[in-house]
Amino acid sequence: MTRSYRLKWFLWLAILVTIGLIVSVFVNYRMSTNIVDTPAAPEDTRATLSINNFEHVAMKEGRKQLVLNAESAKLFSDQQMAVLTKLSATIFTNDQQPIVLTADSGRLDLSTKDVTASGGVIARHPQYALKTEHLKYIQESHMMRIDAPVEITGDFVRFRADSGTYDTETGTIIFEGHVEGWFSDMLK
């Protein structure tokens, strides 16, 4: 074999080995990267839009009034409504005290910004907690309308009633129907 023949053979061998190394590195890199699963398909629904990790913020005159979060939301544009699951809403009073509302499900009226909460509803104020199965928060008047049995507990108070209303701006609660409860001596 001549020297030029051996040199050509060596160059072809080097080229093939280099190509083989490049291909193996590429294949190894592609196999080692995390494959991102495609997101789950939305349920078969008539909703215009389905959103996971939904958030809505209502502001007035530069001040937050309501921050609403939900695990998922189905928006129905023809009805101007969002159907929510596992919702959490923070309602801010005039003095910026937060009232944290949680529920299993709910609805947001997209035109009025009213929130209806259902299933294991709890509204926590820094001084007390309100528990019921259904309530409607009316954004314009800052009122919670409770149309199911309600229980309010705090350090110095406990009440139960058939229904009631709660003005989040003034802190006034009006009970309706059969009402029972107690106050403890707050001046101890």
Image: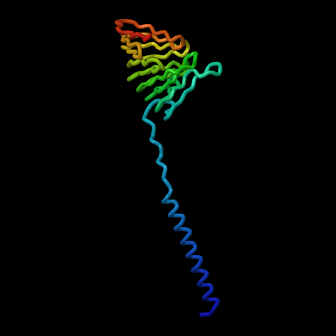
The quarter of the picture where residue 161 lies is top left
Residue 140 horizontal/vertical position (percent): 56, 14
In the picture, which quadrant includes the C terminus? top left
Above or below residue 96? Residue 2 is below
The one nearer the camera, 162 or 81, is 162
**Residue sitting at x 36%, y 12%:** 160
Residue 92 horizontal/vertical position (percent): 55, 20
Residue 150 horizontal/vertical position (percent): 38, 14
Outermost residue toward the front in this view: 188
Above or below residue 45? Residue 178 is above
Residue 10 horizontal/vertical position (percent): 59, 83
The one nearer the camera, 32 or 171, is 171
Q: Which colour scheme is used?
A: rainbow
Instruction: Give the left or right position of residue 60, taking residue 37 as reference.
Output: right
Instruction: Give the left or right position of residue 49, taking residue 154 as reference.
Output: right
Outermost residue toward the bottom in this view: 1
Instruction: Give the left or right position of residue 60, taking residue 121 as reference.
Output: right
The one nearer the camera, 20 or 163, is 163
In the picture, which quadrant includes the N terminus? bottom right
What number of labels is visible? Answer: 0
**Residue sitting at x 64%, y 89%:** 4
The one nearer the camera, 16 or 147, is 147
**Residue sitting at x 47%, y 27%:** 88
